[in-house]
Amino acid sequence: MGWFLVVRLLLASKSSSGCHAPFTSNPKLRVIVNLQTTVSFLLVLGLTACSPIQELDEGPINLFNGTDLAGWQNFGGGKFFVEDGTIVGESAPGLPNSFLATEKMYPDFELEVEFKIHPLLNSGIQIRSNTYAEETTTIRWGGRFKTDGSRDVRERVWGKGRFWGYQVEIDPTDRNWTGTLYEEGARGFLHNPNEATAPEGTFKPYEWNHFRIVAKGDRMQTWLNGVAIADVQDDLTSTGYIALQLHGIGNNKEKIGKKVSWKNIKLTKL
């Protein structure tokens, strides 16, 4: 509706209904006030119609659409593709650890994901992860835990673009470390994985398993198939990518072509 027509309608309504605009009895001022009210209403209506839908901030977000890898990016060059409604990572020789990461970063959230992995492979779910913008030297405690539970402080040099950050471990070996919290490209395990193992039979080889991961403030918690595994407090990073790891295999011919799969990747912002 053009503004000229709006004014004409307001003038007509004055003469036909005898209504008066608030705060004035002057006909000319009455048109101006009514026009301002109409403009305000139309602006509110237009802004409401054009505003993005907010439901995504209130309920689970599907990070994977089940069809393609839209919304994801590949760090490391590993082979990721969609097959039968799942994201698949397939191992290949000569490649480093690779990560299929979200294009967006997420701070506090609850993440649920199902995964299935070949027993010869290793993998993980990255949370609050980043890349080194340039070659970076870190001096932090890290490495493997000693028998007394302590660890050494070590100096490491990381190349530009190296993907790093918190990782919820997927380890199908007899060590039973699936669900423990590791830091990729940095300190290693953030707690003793041998003290946070799930009861025997919790992890299901060759089958779909379920992770629930909660990151809020400096606290990170994990559950494997409903069983609580890790509960760690650490404040090194507060936001970052969520990513799926395809672990490098070197030149191990036995591991070539083996797969790890993920599906039903849902995130709720906290």
Image (cartoon, rainbow, N blue to C red):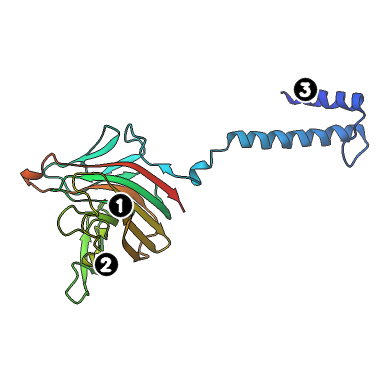
Q: Residue at x 28, y 56 (%)?
A: 167
Callout in the foreground (1, 3): 1
- In front of the other: label 2 or label 3? 2
Which tag, 1 or 3, sits closer to the chain's start?
Answer: 3
The mark that comes first in sequence, 1 or 2, is 2
Give SS at disc 2.
Answer: loop
Q: Which residue is mark 3?
A: 5
Q: Does residue 175 appear in the picture of this structure?
A: yes
- Say left or right for 52 vs 227: right
The amino acid type found where label 2 is placed reads His
**54 displayed left or right of 64:** right
Q: Nearer the viewer, residue 47 or 225?
A: 225
Determine the secondary structure under disc 3: helix
* Res 225 label: 1
Residue 187, position in %: x, y? 25, 64
Residue found 44% across the figure and 48% down from its top: 268
Dot 1 lies on which element?
loop
For label 2, the residue is 191
| Looking at the image, residue 137 lies above or below residue 51 | below
Task: Give the image quarter of residue 8.
Answer: top right
Q: Amino acid at mark 1?
A: Asn
Q: Count neighbours of disc 2 (C-alpha within 10 A) and say few if under 14, some if 14 to 19, many if 20 or more.
A: some
Residue 19 figure quarter? top right
